[in-house]
């Protein structure tokens, strides 16, 4: 609430549009991946599935999320965009393809995105308003696996883990961090706003690298030539 009040004051003082940071950049999972980059090696594959069944609630259709003029791309611009930026932020995007599914009321409530990163790894993102609550991410690296669920972050490594007979088995669980999805979401959003407010109030320009990265994520999202509607 305090950040919201500061944003309203800031908006009155400047005749410019307010820029929000992409929310996924500031959560614990992202910070952990950046910290462990050398230990885990290059990304090979990532899979992100996030959803909750708000489309089955009639109240949903009276909110901004279901208004075509305010939110024409539905769940794609509400959820997928943050995870598209996450992949771009951590690994860089080379190519991107997305399928957007409309429900009976012509609202986009499902979206799947396939990405090829600059290092030729692949990532898949599926977000939906039609399914039971789910929040899971899996990042498979050269030397380990990072799994994220609504209640925790699980880190497995190294790659060369074998049983007594010399057969490869899943790496041991080396670290478990308890999280609460809702707290993690709110904390990440809070940090994102604080980061923006610090630069705005101090009149500090964002680094060119940050500007270029944010612009490229927006470009990949808005000018996705391979965006298909179903």
Image (spheres, rainbow, N blue to C red):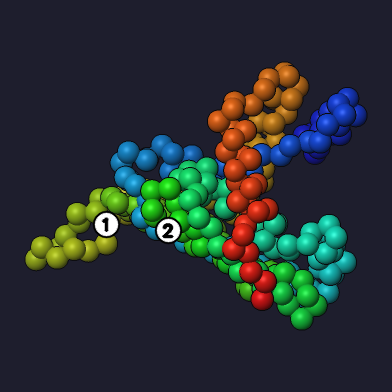
In the rendered image, residue 229, in percent from the top left (x then y), is placed at 67, 71
The answer to which image quadrant residue 108 occupies is bottom right
Left or right of residue 172: residue 8:
right
Residue at the image point whose x is 18% and y is 63% from the top: 168
Residue at the image point whose x is 57% and y is 53% from the top: 83
Q: Residues within 10 Å of mark 2 (few under 14, many from 20)?
A: some
1 and 2 marks in contact (CB < 8 Å): no
Residue at the image point whose x is 70% and y is 57% from the top: 78
**Image quarter hosting the N terminus:** top right
Left or right of residue 67: residue 152:
left
Q: Is residue 72 above or below residue 218?
A: below
Q: How many marks?
A: 2
Label 2, secondary structure: give it.
strand
Residue named by callout 1: 171
Residue nearer the viewer, 101 or 38: 101
Label 1, secondary structure: give it.
loop
Residue named by callout 2: 122
Q: Is residue 212 above or below residue 78?
A: above
In the rendered image, residue 216, in percent from the top left (x then y), is placed at 59, 43
- Residue at the extreme front: 225
């Amino acid at each position: 609430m305090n950040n919201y009040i500061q944003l309203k004051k800031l908006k009155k003082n400047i005749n410019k549009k307010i820029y929000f940071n992409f929310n996924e950049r500031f959560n614990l999972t992202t910070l952990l991946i950046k910290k462990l980059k050398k230990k885990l090696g290059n990304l090979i594959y990532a899979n992100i599935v996030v959803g909750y069944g708000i489309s089955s609630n009639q109240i949903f259709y009276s909110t901004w999320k279901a208004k075509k003029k305010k939110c024409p791309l539905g769940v794609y611009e509400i959820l997928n965009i943050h995870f598209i930026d996450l992949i771009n932020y951590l690994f860089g995007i080379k190519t991107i393809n997305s399928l957007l599914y409309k429900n009976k009321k012509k609202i986009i409530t499902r979206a799947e995105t396939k990405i090829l990163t600059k290092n030729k790894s692949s990532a898949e993102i599926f977000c939906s308003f039609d399914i039971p609550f789910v929040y899971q991410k899996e990042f498979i690296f050269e030397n380990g696996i990072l799994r994220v669920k609504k209640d925790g972050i699980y880190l497995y490594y190294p790659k060369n883990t074998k049983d007594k007979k010399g057969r490869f088995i899943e790496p041991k669980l080396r670290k478990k961090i308890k999280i609460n999805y809702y707290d993690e979401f709110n904390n990440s959003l809070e940090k994102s706003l604080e980061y923006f407010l610090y630069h705005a109030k101090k009149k500090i320009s964002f680094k060119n690298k940050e500007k270029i990265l944010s612009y490229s994520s927006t470009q990949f999202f808005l000018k996705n030539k391979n965006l298909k509607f179903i």
